[in-house]
Image: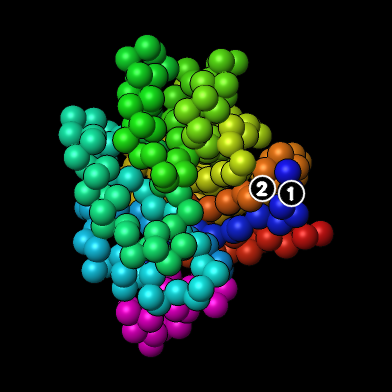
Amino acid sequence: MIQNSFPLIGTSGFSYDDWYGFFYPDKLPKNKRLEFYCQHFNSVEINSSYYKIPTQQTIKRLTDRTPAEFEFIVKVNRETTHRRIENEAALKQLNAALLPMREAEKLKGLLVQFPYSFKNNEQNRKYLSETAAFCKGNPLFFEFRHSSWIKAAIPSFLKSLGVGYVNVDEPLLPGLLPPQEIVTSDFGYIRFHGRNETKWWSGQGSERYDYLYSENELKSWTGHIKEILRKTLKTYIFFNNHPRGQAIQNARQMATLIRS
């Protein structure tokens, strides 16, 4: 295995109005934000697909506005992760929409973020198997929120499905997952959600992700990151603490810390 020496670092989404003045220049047109983002980062998570499956035309526009080496991870729709009723139809629709990005070789995987209510049991493990089968040909990354998934057998189970594991940083609250360094495919994945304990359960909208990491909090991850890098061909790190551009600040800090 050819190990990667440095991860791809980016943010969860890029089209935030409250990034003006913190990252985007005040007079930058909204339709130029992605191009500006690409001047600073080489990968991004597309999160808007969680709320509404995009059209193929929308995906083509995103693809065409990025450099040849730019990489996308696309979050699957909430039908797949939260409603879980018409999963196969939703994934087929998303897969068709992503064709231009796939043809341009910029689509690097699908993020499948399950809610806290999705717990480790036989029925839900069967659902994971079905989801992986529906997505053949697309690298998948499963993110869990409930600590019941911290079981010795889970990494082997995900490896058998050919699915990557998403390590997370989130508040150290009962029932949530702690920092980990689990790898279940050739690709490592880490998401930083912030540690806003007071708003995690009660916050509205993006309030739960309103958090700025300290340098020491980021440093506590460098050992985990180095171990994940050692085990993988490529590793993605995305910051989801997006309010007021905090994700931008922390992504840049993390890149500096890993290089040092």
Mark 2 and mark 1: Cα distance apart in space: 6 Å
| Numbered range of the magenta stretch | 18-40
Drawn side of residue 135 relative to residue 68, left or right: left
Give the labeled residue for mark 1: 2
Residue, x 18% and y 34% (percent of image)?
Answer: 86
Which badge, 2 or 1, comes first in the chain's sequence?
1
Q: Quadrant of the N terminus?
A: top right
Q: Amino acid at mark 2?
A: Leu
- SS at badge 2: loop
- Disc tally is 2
Vertical position of residue 253 compared to residue 124: above or below: below
Amino acid type indicated by mark 1 = Ile
Picture quarter containing residue 84? top left
Q: Position of residue 141 (x, y in %)?
A: 47, 40
Determine whether, in the image, residue 1 is placed left or right of residue 123.
right
Indicate how the structure is coloured in the image. Answer: rainbow
